[in-house]
Image: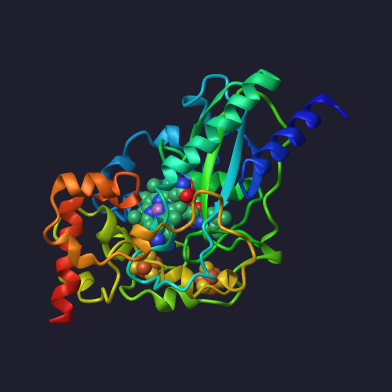
Amino acid sequence: MPYKEEITKNIKEKAISLGFNSCGIVPANTDSEHLNIFINWLKKSYNANLKYLENNVEIRANPKLLVENAKSVVVLLSSYNRQNSSISYNSIARYALSKDYHIVLKRKMYELLNYLKKNWDINGRCFVDSAPILERSYAYNAGLGFIGKNTCLINENLGSWVFISTLIVDKELCFDKQVKISNNSCISCNKCVEACPTGALKPYEIDCNLCISYHTIENRNIVPDNVKSKITNQFFGCDICQIVCPYNKNIKADVTTDLQEINLLKQLDISTFENMTNSMFKKEFKDTSLYRTGLKKLKENANNLKSKKT
Ligand code: B12
Ligand code: SF4
Ligand code: SF4
């Protein structure tokens, strides 16, 4: 087997053995079409107060500006499919029910990177939502799925319940191709757009100013009344536009090791936030995705839901 193919095969096998569900590889190049989609999205101010997205726009689509001598981007998917569980999904978004995915996946990525250094003398850097990278764009180009009208990357076996992580390396590997859209796409479906309670979703485009996920996780300012009035029981994040998606039904994939739901979050009584101190919050929630959002915001979210019940 030629050397490049042998390395590529070995990297993919190692990734799967470490617990990643799928792996694709693309050249470390700029996708100018996707970069333009991103720039136009910013021009419409659909990023709301996520101002950091306006920085480093060139880097987002050019791995060579992140890793010197970058040749390939190894893209990995990790499933957080939770459909066999009996929990109520609506108050905490499914992605956040485990230990923080940034922590879990970073550890796995470093294991892969160390393996590459040791066995193939390959160097690079790994990222999971931790640097300016158009992650969905690379995953799409690596053949790991298609982009749905809900804007998510949808994989034919895993649905959209996946995290994307990337490893940018200094070695040219064998590259994958995009999935054929005709084989796998939204066709005439429009369920997610119709189900979005706030009208945040147009086909293939999200407006964060209206999105419940944005307002319950990221927005540090007051949630506008037009969004607040549409929140039913979403305490943290929102999964509506994914729950209704036919590609998310009957998925067989198991959730990635270390991303299982944890009891603290599964059994969470959100009224406990009312009297929680910062030190209690840190002690209990430090390794969860809720910690990044902060106690002040979580208290506001809890109060908002409480006011709906009274
Ligand atoms: C900002 C952000 C948000 C914002 C905006 C979301 C959005 N749709 O843009 C908010 C706070 C709302 C959010 C919510 C969620 N997020 Co978020 N978020 C991000 C972040 C940091 C940047 C995304 C971004 O650049 N948006 C701007 C738009 C223009 O870019 P884009 O959606 O990535 O689209 C690109 C490509 O898909 C392509 N493209 C766009 N349209 C089309 C159409 C076609 C036909 C084609 C071919 C290509 C194409 O061009 C775009 C630019 O490259 C990424 C991490 C990262 N670094 O990429 C995570 C990320 C997108 N989020 C993720 C997750 C899990 C979520 C939530 C499920 C969490 C939750 N339950 O509350 C929701 C999903 C809501 C939704 N429907 O998107 C995952 C998504 C995994 C997946 N399967 O797609 C990511 C990749 C994090 C990760 N590392 O896994 N998120
Ligand atoms: S996450 Fe919720 S509010 Fe945001 S676009 Fe999807 S359904 Fe709409
Ligand atoms: S719900 Fe329908 S339109 Fe929306 S992403 Fe899924 S298949 Fe596409």
**Which quadrant of the structure image shows residue 303?**
bottom left
* Residue 273, percent from left and from top: 18, 60
Task: Identify the residue at horizontal 43%, vertical 62% (top origin).
Answer: 94
For the question of whether residue 163 can be seen, the reply is yes
* Residue 308, percent from left and from top: 17, 78
Left or right of residue 206, residue 218 in this image:
left
Task: Identify the residue at horizontal 26%, vertical 44% (top origin).
Answer: 51
Which quadrant of the figure contains the C terminus?
Answer: bottom left
* Residue 220, percent from left and from top: 18, 52
Pick the front one: 259 or 162: 259
In this rendering, the count of numbered labels is 0
Residue most extreme to the right: 1
Left or right of residue 87, residue 290 in this image:
left
Residue most extreme to the bottom: 310
* Residue 202, percent from left and from top: 41, 68
**Which quadrant of the structure image shows residue 299?**
bottom left
Left or right of residue 225, residue 202 in this image:
right
**Which quadrant of the structure image shows residue 254?**
bottom right
Pick the front one: 310 or 38: 310
Above or below, 177 relative to 255: above
For the question of whether residue 36 can be seen, the reply is no
Give the image quadrant in which the ligand numbered 2 is located. bottom left
Task: Identify the residue at horizontal 27%, vertical 49% (top origin).
Answer: 284
Task: Identify the residue at horizontal 17%, vertical 80% (top origin).
Answer: 309
